[in-house]
Image (cartoon, helix red, strand yellow):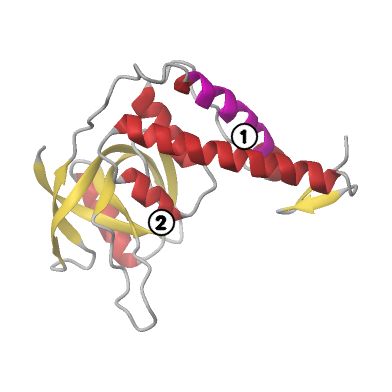
């Protein structure tokens, strides 16, 4: 583990290592933050915004997030900044600071603790097979393209890819991000994938029996 100072971007999204995240930066405080990142090491922390009760403090982060590294950016005529960043590694917040217009934190990066898949040798094959089916259905329901996983991803990377694709709520994704064992993370993600795939298949069958329908603005027809 290694400690460092990190500017924080608090979002309603969970970023996983290895995943690509496009962003449009329009708030002046974050524009300042990104300009400073570009001039230095091009890294910042992405953390999920905590759900707060009515009247609670805004922009309070969860205590664990992912370091993002800028891979491309463009400044638009209106001052907005288009970014593409990639998740690098997880971190834990040790201490928060509001000395800047945006939050910064002293953080420690987290090493992965992985158990070899000796007890469940077929789990990786199962996940890869179900992911192909799951993504195929998602592509029918949404026009947003989803890149398939690389065929040689190991347990840790496959687990992160799976969690990024799964259509589960952010609090559940955050809980899985915080797991320290990558094999346990993959196991729990696989359980969610099996459930989600079954529900999606049932949904597709049910609505197609009724004829043409629309889902998220895209027209689907009975085969």
Earlier in the chain: of badge 1 and badge 2, it is: 1
Query: Which structural element holds mark 1?
Result: helix
Residue 151 in the figure: left or right of residue 59: right
Q: Going 36% across and 45% down the picture, which residue do you hit?
A: 176
Q: Position of residue 118 (x, y in %)?
A: 34, 16
Task: Give the percent coordinates (x, y) of residue 63.
Answer: 23, 56
**In the rendered image, which quarter is residue 86 located in?**
top left
Q: Give coordinates of residue 70: x percent, y percent.
A: 32, 40
| Residue 50 vs residue 189, the one in the foreground | 189
Q: Could you tell me if residue 211 is visible in this image?
A: yes
Asked if residue 216 lies in the magenta stretch, the reply is: no
Instruction: Name the quadrant of the C terminus.
Output: top right
Residue at x-position 61% and y-position 37%: 145
User: How many tags in the picture?
Assistant: 2
The quarter of the rendered structure image containing the N terminus is top left
Q: Which mark is residue 54?
A: none
Q: Is residue 24 visible?
A: no
Q: Give the quadrant of residue 53.
A: bottom left
- Which residue in the protein does label 1 denote? 134
Neighbour tally class for label 2: few under 14, some 14-19, many 20 plus, Cα within 10 Å: some
Q: Is residue 198 above or below residue 172?
A: above
Q: Residues within 10 Å of mark 1 (few under 14, many from 20)?
A: many
Q: What secondary structure is the magenta-colored segment mainly?
A: helix
Furthest-left residue in this view: 3
In the displayed orientation, state which residue is furthest to the right: 211
Q: Please give left or right for residue 191 compared with residue 57 in the image.
A: right
Describe residue 56's horizontal placement relative to residue 107 as left or right: right
From the image, tell me which residue sits under label 2. 171
Query: What segment is highlighted magenta in the picture?
Result: 125-138
From this viewpoint, which residue is outermost toward the bottom? 55
């Amino acid at each position: 583990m290694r400690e460092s100072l990190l500017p924080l971007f608090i979002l309603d999204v969970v970023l996983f290592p290895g995943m690509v995240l496009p962003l449009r930066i329009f708030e002046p405080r974050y524009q300042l933050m990104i300009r400073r990142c570009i001039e230095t090491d091009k890294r910042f922390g992405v953390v999920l915004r905590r759900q707060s009760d009515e009247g609670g403090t805004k922009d309070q982060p969860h205590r664990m997030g992912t370091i993002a590294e800028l891979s491309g950016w463009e400044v638009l005529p209106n001052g907005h900044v288009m970014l593409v960043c990639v998740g690098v590694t997880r971190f834990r917040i040790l201490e928060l600071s509001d000395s800047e217009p945006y939050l910064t934190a002293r953080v420690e990066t987290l090493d992965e603790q992985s158990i070899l898949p000796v007890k469940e040798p077929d789990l990786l094959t199962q996940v890869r097979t179900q992911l192909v089916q799951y993504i195929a259905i998602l592509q029918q329901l949404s026009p947003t393209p989803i890149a398939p996983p690389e065929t040689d991803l190991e347990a840790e990377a496959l687990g992160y890819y799976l969690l990024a694709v799964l259509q589960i709520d952010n609090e559940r994704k955050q809980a899985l991000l915080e797991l320290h064992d990558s094999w346990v993370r993959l196991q729990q993600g696989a359980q969610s994938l099996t459930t989600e795939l079954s529900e999606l298949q049932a949904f597709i069958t049910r609505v197609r029996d009724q004829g043409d329908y629309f889902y998220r603005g895209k027209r689907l027809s009975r085969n």
